[in-house]
Amino acid sequence: MSELVGLGRSDADVRWLGIGRHQAALVIGGSVLVGDWLVRTGSPVIEVLIGVVMVSAAVRCVRGLTGGEFLKVVVLFCARSRWQRLAATREGDVVELRAGGTAAFRGYELNHRGRLDLSGTDIVNAQRLADLMNGLAVGADSSHVSLHVRRSGPDTRTFLALATDAAVCEGWSPSERLVDEVIGMDVGSSSLVLERWSYLRTNDQLRRVIRVDDFQGATSERALLERLQEVALDTDLALHVEVVGSLRAQRIAARAVHRVGSDAQVSRAAGFRRSAHAALSSQRLSQREELVANGQALLRLGVFVTLRSSSLSELRDSSRELQRKVVESGLRVDTGVGRQWSWFCFQLPGGPGW
């Protein structure tokens, strides 16, 4: 969607002058309490303390999260059970997965013919997938597609999960065995997963799920996710795509352009100079609106990397190696501490809980 001016940071949670709605609410509420304490005689000290805490909670301080968001993560992690259940059933060629939510999908494996470069230079397969996305966007409802690159030692296999009513493009064939490997268990059974603060323990392996949340530093000289596939340990790279229906896509694109334009007008009226970053973001959104109006699919992307190991020390080493590769790629990732079970569900085929 943004190949002319480059991918940027996700704009899904930006609401007002570059900050989230909860940040604006906390800052306004905290400022009101502090102001009331300053001007009103006899105001209790607890009022100003609450105001200061609310303003502090709006500041980004821990792994890209605001203080309030991080506190929410800690509370939810402590409140939920450490043990979670993963189950999958098959009816015909449809697999139903239950993990934090329920998702049904059909799974296909890429037919490798000769040497296939998984770094992104296989133009034919990429174009077929792009045509598939554009076809799905014609409908009124959103559709979920996920592409999984599973690396085990020297072997690499590619898996595609589609909605049950979507037709697969040429070059893919059903593969029941690869479905089991991508899920991490045999379809038709269930498994317990133990969640820790920064990793998961399954029946046979330890896993850590990491999410890519910023693409703005990436260059066009290399394939976007190439470096992430060069980690020495076994990895699963999951690219999830929500294909937004055409009518809703046009509303989303137009609303985003209007929001950024309104923010720019407010900033100029207040005497602030518009930064180059803001101008580039506006250009990117205007380009997206034009592409959607011309019939191109609007995609919401989620990229997850799952590291697999039999020991915690190897898992930590591979995590550090992955983060070095991320820096080389110009990307930024979130390690998902306290949210490993949720992200494990998100990266599974079909994205249960999306």
Image (tube, rainbow, N blue to C red):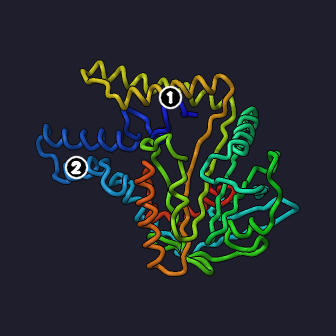
Figure quadrant of residue 154: bottom right
What's under tag 2, amino acid-wise?
Val
Let me know if residue 166 appears in the view: no
Badge 2 element: helix
Residue occupying the point 61% across, 48% down: 120
The residue to which callout 1 is attached is 285
Of the residues shown, which amino acid type is indicated by label 1? Leu
Neighbour tally class for label 2: few under 14, some 14-19, many 20 plus, Cα within 10 Å: some
| Residue visible at 78% across and 69% down in the picture | 177
The quarter of the image holding the N terminus is top right
Report the mark closest to the observer, 2 or 1: 1
| Dot placed on the residue nearer the N-terminal end, 2 or 1 | 2
In the depicted structure, whether residue 96 falls above or below residue 221: below
Q: Residue at x 55, y 47 (%)?
A: 223
Whole-percent x and y of residue 342?
55, 62
Mark 1 secondary-structure assignment: helix
User: How many numbered callouts?
Assistant: 2
Q: Nearer the viewer, residue 149 or 71?
A: 149
Residue 123 location (% of width, % of height): 68, 42
Q: Nearer the viewer, residue 320 or 73?
A: 320
Give the label on residue 352, or none: none
Q: Please tell me how crowded label 1 is: few (under 14), some (14-19), or many (20+) other residues with Cα within 10 Å.
A: many
Q: Is residue 173 visible?
A: yes
Q: Where is residue 146 shown, x and y percent of the image?
A: 67, 52
Above or below residue 119? Residue 196 is below
Q: Label 2 belongs to which residue?
A: 52
Which image quadrant for residue 265?
top left
Please tell me which residue lies in front, 200 or 229: 229
